């Protein structure tokens, strides 16, 4: 079965850092575009960062220069390094996997990991 398991969330002070991880199983990792989304209470789900099969990256303007997405092909894992965290980064963060070859196939989602930025 397909599983995306996120970890690394927690409570951090403004200006601090966290590193999220998403371990994928049951998929051919190398053919999937991976991404991190987040959703705060009362707000729309938004794309935070994505990384393609060729390791091209994209970031939301709100996190550009502060966050970095990467993928480890030896461990089927995607990371999101989050620096200079702000209270507005508080959200439930979800890992997403989309097949880059079969583009009409529905993506997979993880269960989410909570990030809270507060003093």
Image (cartoon, rainbow, N blue to C red):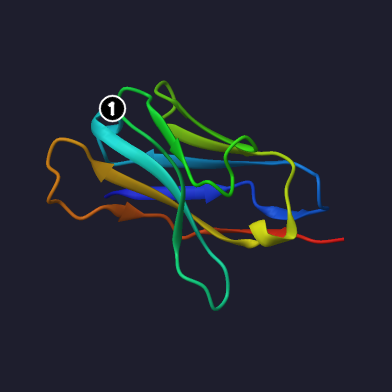
Q: Position of residue 59 (x, y in %)?
A: 48, 41
Q: Position of residue 57 (x, y in %)?
A: 42, 31
Give the residue number, with chain letter if any, for mark 1.
Answer: 30
Q: Position of residue 45 (x, y in %)?
A: 45, 65
Residue at 12% x, 41% y: name it: 102
| Residue 20 relative to residue 13: left or right | left
**Callout 1: helix, strand or loop?**
helix
Quarter-wise, where is residue 21 in the image? top right
In this view, the residue in front, 62 or 56, is 62
Residue closest to the far front: 61
Which quadrant would the C terminus be assigned to in this image? Answer: bottom right
Please say if 80 is above or below 9: above
Residue at 63% x, 46% y: name it: 8
Q: Position of residue 69 (x, y in %)?
A: 51, 34
Please say if 56 is above or below 101: above
| Residue 47 relative to residue 116: left or right | left
Residue at 28% x, 27% y: name it: 30
Quarter-wise, where is residue 26 in the image? top left
Instruction: Determine crowd level at label 1: few under 14, some 14-19, many 20+ residues with C-alpha closer than 10 A.
Output: some
| Residue 108 relative to residue 67: left or right | left
Q: How many marks?
A: 1
Residue at 20% x, 55% y: name it: 106
Residue closest to the far right: 119
């Amino acid at each position: 079965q397909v599983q995306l398991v996120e970890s690394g969330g927690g409570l951090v002070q403004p200006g601090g850092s966290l590193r999220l991880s998403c371990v994928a199983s049951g998929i051919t990792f190398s053919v999937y575009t991976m991404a991190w989304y987040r959703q705060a209470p009362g707000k729309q789900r938004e794309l935070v960062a994505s990384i393609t099969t060729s390791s091209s990256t994209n970031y939301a303007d709100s996190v550009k220069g502060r966050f970095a997405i990467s993928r480890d092909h030896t461990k089927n894992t995607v990371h999101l390094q989050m620096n200079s965290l702000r209270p507005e980064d508080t959200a439930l963060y979800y890992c997403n996997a989309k097949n880059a070859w079969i583009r009409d196939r529905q993506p997979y989602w993880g269960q989410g990991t909570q990030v809270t930025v507060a003093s």
